[in-house]
Image: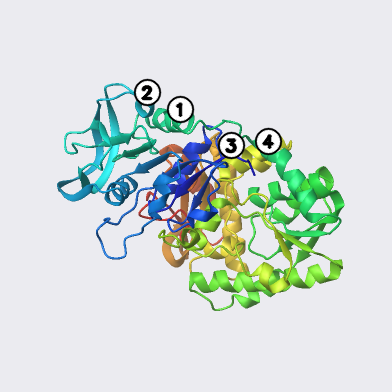
């Protein structure tokens, strides 16, 4: 990892990962940590700046998340965003009060001081507000540097101590000059070097893997998705055939997935790959199960069982590698003990290392999906691998609403194949973050030829997004949707009705289960 970094204290904001991504866009490394992080763990030479995220709480509410008050006297620059600004105010002796009118959405920011934080930012610009409290009285030594119509102190600063606060969210796209503001904090205030890149990441990580693994062997569960694929190629670059990849066909994969994985990783990358067909074992375990979380747990436990069995056959193995990403860690365990909510279970974040008593190697655990793709590019991986849409760990099991059977998997595989190949043929695949089909637990009446039918209903889902944390439904032209629907109904036996999902995230999630 880089020697320099920015720490982001997570107070529960839905945008905390967006803050991290915006910092990294400036080629500066950062980490998201709990608000109660021990001040003794903060290296003053290594940490160039601290950002306090927003959050849904009021600083005066019982149980509101707090940070160590000494964080403001470390001599490290601090930027408080929304709740972070209000917390800074309260801790340093100012006053926060309830706003008469909640300010939410776009707001015009009037800058009164263009020094440091607002350098090159116009006198008036559009920002994004989301708050019910406001700074009523600034702490001693602070000066107002910006205001909005409803917020007299929309930004303040203590220039001497390099402490800054903004009531708006510079990390969201709606704040027109948000990138400039974050860049000013990083470069002019924190004096951070912009030397964090995927090229440097590959070089440093390969060296770290070699040092950690030594002469030991590493085993990795290869799914064929972007994350595990990049992890496999990266580790293979570091230790070669001492990496053994196990590909488990669980019967819940996309069409021809097992064949594709063998061709890419055995033939092209020359990776030591072991393929195991355990589809009957997984499908038997899922028999009669409807609850989505139970499906995930059964699949996770079965995967552990199969993986452990096959790993033992390899012989002496000391390390387990996983393609865990930063969002996996945050979503799976409430932002490292912070206030963010757990959304769903990720079966690749836990369970396996404890069961198998192996040392863990997770080379991508501090990266976001777009960064992982860039790492793959640095490793010479083809865009057909790196550009693939995300696929859930539990596979088709969470895209089949209701009981999972081989027959229902086969139907969904064929539907998904028609959908994906159609948007590829129309040149839309790369414009869409994720596209897939869902098999619903209902049947509908239809007419095919002169016969009345009673067959399955499928829903098509396609979304646009940057990192999957928020997403909007993709506006696929109606004439293309019509062609896709006709193709599915005509070519896939057992389906007579196709629906298109037009919900965004939030409030919906991308996957249906």
Cβ atoms at labels 1 and 4 below 8 Å apart: no
Picture coordinates of residue 74 (x, y %)? 45, 45
- Label 3 and label 1: CA atoms lie apart by 47 Å
At mark 3, the secondary structure is helix
Which tag, 2 or 3, sits closer to the chain's start?
2
Which tag, 4 or 2, sits closer to the chain's start?
2
Which tag, 1 or 4, sits closer to the chain's start?
1
Q: Nearer the viewer, mark 4 or mark 2?
A: 2
At mark 1, the secondary structure is helix
Q: Nearer the viewer, mark 2 or mark 1?
A: 1
Cβ atoms at labels 2 and 3 below 8 Å apart: no
Horizontal relation, residue 16 to residue 426: left or right? left
Report the residue marked by disc 1: 188
Q: Nearer the viewer, mark 3 or mark 1?
A: 1
Is residue 449 in view from this perspective? no
Report the residue marked by disc 2: 119
Q: How is the image coloured?
A: rainbow
Report the residue marked by disc 3: 425
- Label 2 and label 1: CA atoms lie apart by 9 Å
**Picture quadrant where residue 381 is located:** top right
Which tag, 3 or 1, sits closer to the chain's start?
1
User: Residue at the location (41% across, 41% down)?
Assistant: 78
- Label 2 and label 3: CA atoms lie apart by 47 Å
Q: Which of these two is toward me, 105 or 421?
A: 105
User: Residue at the location (27% across, 55% down)?
Assistant: 59
- Counting other residues with Cα less than 10 Å from the Cα at mark 4, is it few (<14), some (14-19), or many (20 or more)? some
At mark 2, the secondary structure is loop
Is residue 286 in view from this perspective? yes
* Label ID, residue 200: 4
Cβ atoms at labels 2 and 1 below 8 Å apart: yes
Picture coordinates of residue 80 (x, y %)? 36, 43
């Amino acid at each position: 990892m880089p020697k320099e970094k920015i720490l982001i204290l997570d107070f529960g904001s839905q945008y905390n990962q967006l803050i991290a991504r915006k910092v990294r866009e400036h080629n500066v490394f950062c980490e998201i940590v709990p608000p109660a992080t021990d001040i003794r763990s903060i290296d003053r030479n290594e940490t160039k700046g601290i950002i306090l995220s927003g959050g849904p709480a009021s600083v005066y509410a019982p149980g509101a998340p707090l940070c160590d008050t000494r964080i403001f006297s470390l001599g490290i620059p601090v930027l408080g965003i929304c709740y972070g600004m209000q917390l800074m105010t309260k801790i340093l002796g100012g006053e926060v009060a309830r706003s008469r009118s909640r300010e939410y959405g776009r707001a015009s920011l009037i800058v009164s001081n263009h020094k440091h934080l607002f350098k090159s930012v116009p006198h008036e610009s559009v920002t994004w507000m989301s708050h019910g409290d406001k700074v009523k009285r600034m702490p001693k030594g602070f000066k107002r540097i910006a205001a909005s119509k409803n917020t007299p102190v929309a930004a303040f600063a203590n220039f001497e101590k390099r402490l800054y606060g903004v009531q708006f969210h510079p990390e969201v796209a709606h704040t027109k000059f948000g990138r400039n503001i974050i860049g000013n904090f990083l470069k002019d205030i924190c004096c951070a070097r912009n030397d964090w890149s995927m090229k440097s990441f590959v070089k440093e990580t390969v060296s770290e893997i070699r040092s950690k693994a030594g002469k030991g062997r590493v085993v990795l569960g290869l799914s064929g998705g972007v994350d595990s694929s990049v992890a496999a190629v990266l580790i293979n670059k570091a230790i070669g055939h001492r990496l053994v990849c196990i590909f488990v066909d669980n019967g819940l994969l996309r069409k021809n997935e097992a064949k594709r994985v063998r061709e890419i990783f055995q033939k092209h990358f020359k990776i030591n790959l072991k393929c195991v067909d355990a589809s009957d074992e997984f499908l038997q375990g899922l028999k009669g199960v409807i609850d989505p979380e139970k499906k995930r747990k059964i699949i996770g436990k079965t995967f552990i069982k199969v993986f452990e069995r096959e790993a033992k056959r390899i012989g002496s193995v000391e390390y387990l590698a996983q393609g865990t990403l930063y969002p996996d860690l945050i979503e799976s365990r409430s932002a490292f003990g912070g206030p963010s909510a757990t959304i769903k279970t990720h079966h690749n974040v836990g369970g396996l290392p404890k069961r198998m008593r192996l040392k863990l190697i997770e080379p991508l655990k501090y990266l976001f999906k777009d960064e992982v793709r860039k790492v793959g590019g640095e490793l010479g991986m083809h865009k057909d691998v790196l550009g693939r849409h995300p696929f859930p760990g539990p596979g088709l099991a969470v895209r089949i609403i209701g009981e999972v059977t081989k027959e229902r998997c086969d139907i969904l595989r064929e539907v998904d194949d028609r959908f994906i190949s159609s948007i590829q043929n129309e040149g839309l695949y790369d414009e869409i973050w994720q596209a897939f089909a869902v098999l619903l637990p209902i049947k509908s009446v239809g007419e095919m030829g002169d016969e009345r039918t009673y067959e399955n209903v499928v829903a098509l889902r396609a979304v646009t997004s940057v990192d999957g944390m928020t997403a909007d439904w993709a506006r696929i032209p109606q004439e293309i949707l019509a062609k896709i629907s006709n193709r599915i109904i005509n070519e896939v036996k057992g389906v007579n009705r196709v629906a298109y999902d037009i919900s965004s995230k939030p409030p919906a999630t991308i996957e249906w289960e």
